[in-house]
Image (cartoon, rainbow, N blue to C red):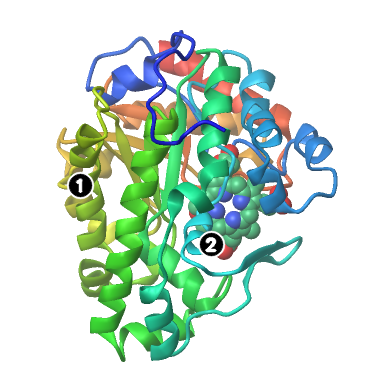
Amino acid sequence: MTSSLTIKKDFPPLKNDLILRTLKGETVERPPCWIMRQAGRYLPEYHEVKNGRNFFELCQDAELASEVTLQPIRRYEGLIDAAIIFSDILVIPQAMGMNVEMIDGRGPVFQHPIRTVQDIEDVLNYEVALEKSLLWAFDSIRLTRMKLNGEVPLFGFIGAPWTLLVYMVEGGSSKIFRFVKELINTYPELIHKLLNKITDVAIEFLCKQVVAGAQLLQVFESWGGELSSMDFDEFSLPYLKRISETVPQRLKEYGVEDKIPMIIFAKNSWYALDKLCGLNFDAVSLDWSWDPTYATKINNGRVTLQGNLDPGIIYGSEEIISKKVEHMITSFGGGKRHYIVNFGHGTHPFMDPEKIRFFLQECHRIGSQ
Ligand code: 1CP
């Protein structure tokens, strides 16, 4: 088995570097396009490969995970400018000793969520060994890079510390966030220790994904909007800041010569946009609550913006999809600089893949004008 610590340099040469040039701030011929959750349940070919398998079993099989990662790239040939490795944000809690299963129709379920001081201490005392527990993730990235054959660059990703804490405490998806709110408002100091540990693991995992072959990175703060502005400043922002500053430093220590671009997606955290643009990320991904013109003004040229149409437009007519794509791209300044097309959040299982093709084609057509 290959060691995850060796930087592999003989991957096939990259043929499409549009998203990398955009993230460097260059003026480009059209905005790069990719879609959150571009692989997965809306694609019939995904169900064929999954074939009743357990979700994490699929992630951990490098051959199958790389196949699923490539499916949207193949189906939408030439329309998608980046691949994202097929995995999940919850692999970090797993690497921190927690048992997580993915139940069809219900989502993630933790066997023993963190609910008490002792539970927190147990996770703090757990010795994380990423190279052992997540070896499959690094193998999967390496194999996917080979199979991509340089068509498009490959994203690695993590869940941000606050979002991971939510799952680790709630034990799965939540609507009222009762348990995590109880803990942050009862034992803030201990929670900070835990968030710091999650952050350490997240930084190592991001770096090791790059060492394995990831060419750009996205951090998902999907539950950012569940915090008040004041609590976001305390329980999310400092950890995002540390990730954005430490990953580039650590990558140099790992011997990675290229600058690896990093994107932050903090869903519904509208009050934090100015602060997020001031961190050391190269791009900020916006959910659909944002008016692109207003977001562009707040950003004031500091980072690349990504987003942000409501994925729900895919249920609509082609005429309205075109109209909204046009509005999006124009409002982001025409898309030739500092802009990446995406939805404001992921695809849904019910979406028609051919409507998504139409959306991508329109982004190319309008973005090239
Ligand atoms: O059996 C299945 O097919 C399960 C569906 C599924 C898929 C396809 C899950 C379960 N995860 C994934 C893959 C996944 N998850 C990817 C790679 C695929 C791609 O993007 O093309 C990525 C980047 C994620 C990230 C992820 N997982 C996030 C952050 C992005 C977001 O949507 O906000 C989150 C919150 C999760 C948790 C998660 N994974 C899966 C479920 C059902 C959930 C819970 C969602 C919730 O709490 O509402």
Q: Decide: is 62 above or below 148.
A: below
Disc 2, SS: helix
Q: Quadrant of the C terminus?
A: top left
What percent of the width, then of the height, locates residue 312?
60, 46
Which amino acid lies under the numbered mark 2 shown in the image of this protein? Gln
Tell me, yes or no, whether the two marked residues, 1 and 2, touch with CB atoms within 8 Å: no
Q: What residue would you read off at disc 1?
A: 246
Q: Is residue 51 left or right of residue 18?
A: right
Work out how far the residue at label 1 is from the one at label 2, CA to CA, in angstroms: 23 Å
Would you call the spot at circle 2 few (<14 residues within 10 Å), some (14-19), or many (20 or more)? some
What percent of the width, then of the height, locates residue 221?
39, 56
Q: Is residue 291 visible?
A: no
The residue sitting at 55% across, 50% down in the picture is: 88
What percent of the width, then of the height, locates residue 150?
50, 13
Would you call the spot at circle 1 few (<14 residues within 10 Å), some (14-19), or many (20 or more)? some
Closest to the observer, 70 or 368: 70
The residue sitting at 36% across, 9% down in the picture is: 29
Q: What residue would you read off at disc 2?
A: 94
Closest to the observer, 58 or 136: 136
The residue sitting at 64% across, 38% down in the picture is: 314
Q: Decide: is 140 above or below 277.
A: above
Question: Image quarter for residue 79?
Answer: top right
Answer with mark 1 or mark 2, whichever residue precedes in sequence. 2
Q: Is residue 127 left or right of residue 46?
A: left
